[in-house]
Amino acid sequence: MAVPEPLRMELTNAARRASERAYCPYSRFRVGAAVLTEDGTIVAGCNVENASYGLTICAERNAIFQAVAIGQARVRAVAIYTPTPSPSAPCGACRQVINEFGPDAEILSVCDGPDVLHRTLADLLPNAFGPKNLAP
Ligand code: THU
């Protein structure tokens, strides 16, 4: 079921707030994400970079891993905030990780401009490989 508007607002606000905690001394690109889990819990995350660059974790994966770590492994929606004039969809790696925990998730990307990108994960990652492919 689609996430109702007041909850969407709460979720995107949590993503915006999380971007303030980004650790991004290399890119200076502050990203925030917030995950809405099955029971209505909102878990936020930010991008965390590393001097070795390749170990950087995106905001979306950080938020999802934190949700899993508190026992909230079913993802209903993910909001992403980027400090850009137009919204950005999650990167490919994050789409694959979202699929693991929320194949039917709604994805809401917000930014500093008025546009909102509202998609399903299936729109962004059609014919995904996931847990269902490993089932006996
Ligand atoms: N980044 C995210 O956190 N999420 C995305 O979907 C795309 C990129 C981060 C990674 C890196 O810290 C910075 O943005 C620049 O790529």
Image (cartoon, rainbow, N blue to C red):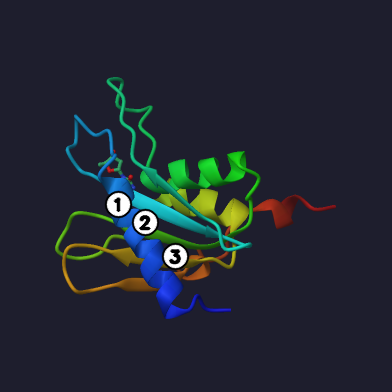
The three-letter amino acid code for the residue at tag 1 is Arg
Residue drawn at x 37%, y 55% as measured from the top left: 90
Dividing the image into four equal quarters, which quarter contains ligand 1?
Answer: top left
Q: On the image, numbered disc 1 is attached to which residue?
A: 17
Q: On the image, numbered disc 2 is attached to which residue?
A: 14
Q: Can residue 49 be seen here?
A: yes
Residue drawn at x 25%, y 55% as measured from the top left: 82
The three-letter amino acid code for the residue at tag 2 is Ala
Mark 1 crowd level (few <14, some 14–19, many ≥20, 10 Å Cα) = some
Which of 53/65 is in front? 65
The three-letter amino acid code for the residue at tag 3 is Leu
Q: On the image, numbered disc 3 is attached to which residue?
A: 124
Q: Is residue 9 above or below residue 30?
A: below
Whichever of callouts 3 and 2 sits on the residue coming sooner in the sequence is 2
Whichever of callouts 3 and 1 sits on the residue coming sooner in the sequence is 1
Q: Residue furthest top?
A: 52
| 3D distance between C-alphas at marks 3 and 2 | 22 Å
Percent position of residue 107, x then y: 43, 66
Percent position of residue 46, x then y: 35, 43
Which of 75/136 is in front? 75
Mark 3 crowd level (few <14, some 14–19, many ≥20, 10 Å Cα) = some
Q: Secondary structure at mark 2?
A: helix
Percent position of residue 48, x then y: 34, 34
| 3D distance between C-alphas at marks 3 and 1 | 25 Å
Q: Is residue 52 above or below residue 117?
A: above
Residue drawn at x 62%, y 62% as measured from the top left: 38
Mark 2 crowd level (few <14, some 14–19, many ≥20, 10 Å Cα) = many
Q: Are marks 1 and 2 in contact (CB under 8 Å)?
A: yes
Which corner quadrant holds the N terminus?
bottom right
Q: Nearer the viewer, mark 3 or mark 2?
A: 2
